[in-house]
Amino acid sequence: MTPEEFWSILYAKVVEYPIFYRLYYNEQGQPLCYTMEDLPGNYIEIDQEIFARSPSNIQVCDGKIIEITWQTTAKLAPTDTGTPCAPTDVSIVVSETNNHQKWSKLSHGYKSN
């Protein structure tokens, strides 16, 4: 290498590529990966904050991110059907022939915000 080649390489302009953040997802809208690469498949452009968080509780619908909130606990509620319990204590299961209040779990799962 000649000194001219060395100095030309040293002072050569650095090629800058645009920075982009992408979320790739499948046909159902479930996230596959967060990346800065150009890969084949369905993707949406996201901001740096979402890229840094990389949430897994999301779904892509019509090109927008929908966060899914999981409800992890189920609550008991008085109902007409369910387990008969003592009227003063839900932890005591009684026969239906005794004075009772029936209790059931409320439906649980996920809800979208």
Image (tube, helix red, strand yellow):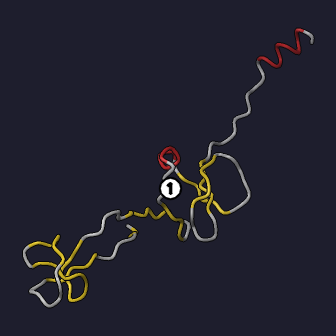
| Residue 15 % position (x, y) | 74, 33
Q: Position of residue 36 (x, y in %)?
A: 64, 45
4 or 58: nearer the eye? 58
Extreme residue toward the top, this view: 3
The residue closer to the viewer here, 64 or 96, is 96
Seen at 40% across and 69% down, the residue is 110
Q: In which quarter of the image is the C terminus?
A: bottom left
As rendered, which of 22 and 80 lies closer to the eye? 80
Q: Position of residue 83 (x, y in %)?
A: 23, 81
**Residue shown at 82% from the left, 13% from the top:** 7
Q: Hey, which residue is sitting farthest right in the picture?
A: 1
Amino acid type at circle 1 is Ser
- Residue 70 position (above or below residue 6): below
Element at label 1: loop
In the rendered image, residue 6, in percent from the top left (x then y), is placed at: 85, 13
Which residue does the image show at 78% across and 23% down from the upper left? 12
Lateral position of residue 52 relative to residue 88, left or right: right
Q: Mark 1 points at which residue?
A: 56
